Image (tube, helix red, strand yellow):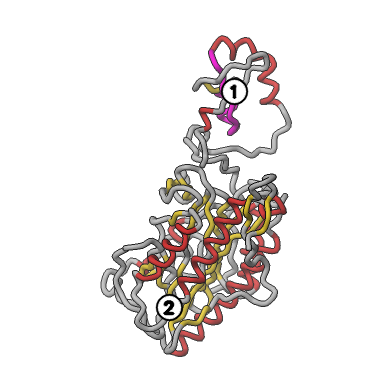
Amino acid sequence: MATDASDQRTCAGGDCSNDAGSLQCPNCQKLGKESYFCSQECFKRNWSEHKKLHKSKTTGHFNPFPTFPFTGSLRPVYPLSAKREVPKTIHLPDYAKDGIPRSEQVFVGRNKIAVLDLKQQEGMRKVCRLAREVLDIAARAAKPGVTTDFIDEIVHKACLERDSYPSPLNYCHFPKSVCTSPNEVICHGIPDQRVLKDGDILNIDVTLYHGGFHGDINETYYIGDKALADEGSVRVTETARECLDRAIELVKPGMLFRDPGNVIEKFAKTRDCSVIKTYCGHGINQLFHCAPNVPHYAKNKAVGTAKPGMCFTIEPMISLGTHRDKTWPDDWTSVTTDGTRTAQFEHTLLVTETGVEILTARFPDSPGGPVPLITPAASNGDATAAT
């Protein structure tokens, strides 16, 4: 469990070992840094030395929300790169120019779940295969030392190379072409200048628009060997992966859309994890988001029954701590309120006459994939793989 950062602060005065209070250096705040002092007198006494920190070599990067009470250690690193251009030859969704998905805001029939004909199903198969290709390209680039903005650039270029539009770009004014969500970020993380570190976990959420259809997929990846050696990171990631696998096993004609949540939450609890309740799976076809809603928690009230030809996602978000979420002032980035790590996996699914087709299924050479759980050895504290 994350502890309150205020309980761990030491005064930033070079000659002081007192606990810090709430007094912050205003110049550090402007630079997106955190430096707390125990008193005004201590701040004044240390000013001549402390101010040198403001003149140290700068990158031009900053935290745009210096006074926001962040729940974990992650901070946004701005400025964001400029909006990436899309050639006129690419077929655009209706929101691409003004950010308003009008086709999703039609009230007549908005709760009716679309059943796709064979031609439309083939359109979904194609875009989902392309989405898998792009996610795999992004995953191979996700390693310590690169920024999430670099991953956004890779995803954007890969989409255009496939004559596809990156669906997140300007969807309800989202500024980037992919969602990148590290550590305590549940979903909708905005790619920025933060450098990925050995020990991070990172969810990459890719959606393509091609041939009039959207294909949606995400996975969580281990960044460096430290992440693979961290018990909590492995537990939450592998739990999220298996929650999705177990939910998909339910999908067939006649499945109630409220049923996957029961299976997901039951299994998550066996791993001492919780299920985020705010976000759910969704219908997807010519629309990015539509009916049905597919919640991931137990005893939900979702309506509807699966029928052949329906397309939707299941995308459980699993936390090591609380299920409660909080949104950053960018109006997108959703984080756990206790700062604990989360992981998510998503597939786009097609209900068939006999079961389900995973349209975004992994290729034989797809990066990532399951790893064994880590169990702390009781005798010496060494980490060992669970059997």
Q: Circle 1 sits on which residue?
A: 10
Viewer-closest of 195 and 16: 16
Tell which of 59 and 273 is nearer to you. Answer: 273
Name which of mark 2 and mark 1 comes first in the sequence. 1
Callout 1 secondary element: loop
Residue at (51%, 43%) from the top-left corner?
Answer: 339
Amino acid type at mark 1: Thr
Q: Is residue 242 above or below residue 232?
A: below
x and y, in percent, of residue 233 in the image: 60, 52
Residue 360: give x, y in percent of width and height: 55, 75
Q: On the image, numbered disc 2 is attached to which residue?
A: 251
Residue 37 on the magenta segment: yes
**Visible residue check, residue 329:** no
The amino acid pointed to by label 2 is: Val
The outermost residue toward the left is 108
On screen, residue 110 versus residue 214, left or right, reads: left
Q: Specify the quadrant that holds the C terminus.
A: bottom right
User: In 3D space, how far apart are the residues under numbered discs 2 and 1 (Cα atoms)?
Assistant: 53 Å
The stretch in magenta equals 26-39
Identify which residue is drawn at 55% across, 20% down. Answer: 20
